[in-house]
Image (tube, rainbow, N blue to C red):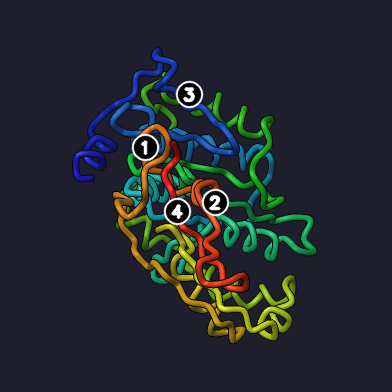
């Protein structure tokens, strides 16, 4: 992990190499600093491109910024905030620097934009989703709260690559200490506002009344600290069975290719019902893929 973070700050991508250019997939750019596909230059260029896109489209409300538990997320967050603050973007950071799941970012955007036609909010989620521990990711959510469409990501991608080719000429940036103290940098309680609103879309009384015993494994993800408050607020019989936050994700089993992925579908693919305790009590036993 120290070498991974060092490579993020010290390595410089070569935009003439296709694998080292900014390339958006589902709303975001992903890569590894070991492979020069996710380094500080990428994040600085993408962040400036997002600022320029916002200005072009007249998006001047707050930008909600959240991160996950991958090792490269904190460095990328720092780089992004330095650019956002330099561009005078109103940025909303999580209280106590809490990890922020993507749905919490989407929820904050939608709640803020409800009933508005101007001054709309958008967001950035620093996450490579379930990809391996050496991966970094940077996603943009427009005012609709969901993943950015290809027309949006295409514009940001092209502009970011142009900035890379110019040696970051045109990227505005201030030191992180100034960025954190900037008048445009604010705090937002993502966790409690999200948890409080769950009851408006889910029938928590029905779940609580069913008296179901639930075990939750956050798989070391950004939602790790959300499940406890959910259980407490709505009186659910819910136990978090794994509260580990480890950027190596060494508590995970390996996928078919030997890579570690924090993917719940992997768990479900390998789950086998255990009826040894009778027909009404089932457990899931995890088996590696052949």
Which SS class for mark 3?
helix
Q: Is residue 236 above or below residue 49?
A: below
Work out whether mark 2 precedes mark 1 in sequence or the reverse, and give the earlier one.
1
Give the CA distance from mark 3 to mark 1. 29 Å
Which SS class for mark 1?
loop
Q: Is residue 174 above or below residue 199?
A: above
- Residue positioned 50% across, 67% down in the render: 276
Near mark 4 (Cα within 10 A), the count class, few <14, some 14-19 or many ≥20, is: some
Give the CA distance from mark 3 to mark 4. 43 Å
Given residues 177 and 143, the one toward you in this image is 143
Q: Which mark is residue 161?
A: 3
Closest to the camera, between mark 2 and mark 1, is 2
Image marks 2 and 1: residues in contact by CB distance under 8 Å: no
- Report which residue position mark 2 lands on: 268
Q: Is residue 290 above or below residue 13?
A: below
- Residue positioned 64% across, 62% down in the render: 107
- Report which residue position mark 1 lands on: 259
């Amino acid at each position: 992990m120290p070498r991974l973070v060092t490579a993020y700050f010290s390595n410089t991508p070569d935009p003439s190499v296709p694998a080292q250019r900014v390339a958006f997939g589902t709303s975001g750019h992903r890569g590894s600093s070991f492979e020069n596909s996710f380094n500080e230059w990428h994040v600085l260029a993408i962040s400036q491109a997002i600022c320029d896109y916002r200005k072009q489209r007249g998006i001047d409300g707050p930008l909600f910024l959240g991160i996950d538990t991958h090792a490269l997320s904190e460095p990328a967050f720092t780089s992004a905030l330095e650019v956002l603050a330099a561009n005078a973007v109103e940025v909303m950071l999580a209280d106590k620097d809490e990890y922020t799941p993507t749905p919490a970012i989407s929820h904050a955007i939608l709640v803020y934009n409800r009933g508005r036609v101007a001054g709309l909010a958008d967001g950035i989620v620093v996450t490579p989703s379930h990809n391996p521990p050496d991966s970094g990711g940077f996603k943009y959510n427009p005012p609709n709260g969901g993943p950015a469409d290809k027309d949006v990501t295409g514009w940001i991608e092209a502009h970011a690559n142009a900035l890379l080719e110019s040696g970051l000429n045109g990227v505005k940036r201030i030191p992180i200490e100034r960025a954190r103290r900037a008048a445009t940098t604010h705090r937002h309680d993502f966790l409690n506002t999200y948890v409080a609103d769950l009851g408006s879309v889910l029938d928590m009384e029905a779940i609580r009344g069913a008296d179901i015993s639930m075990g939750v494994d956050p798989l070391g993800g950004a939602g790790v600290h959300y499940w406890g408050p959910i259980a407490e607020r709505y009186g659910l019989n819910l136990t978090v069975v794994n509260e580990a936050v480890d950027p190596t994700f060494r508590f995970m089993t390996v996928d078919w290719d030997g890579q570690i992925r924090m993917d719940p579908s992997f768990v479900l693919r390998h789950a086998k019902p255990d009826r040894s305790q009778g027909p009404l009590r089932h457990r899931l036993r995890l088996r590696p893929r052949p």
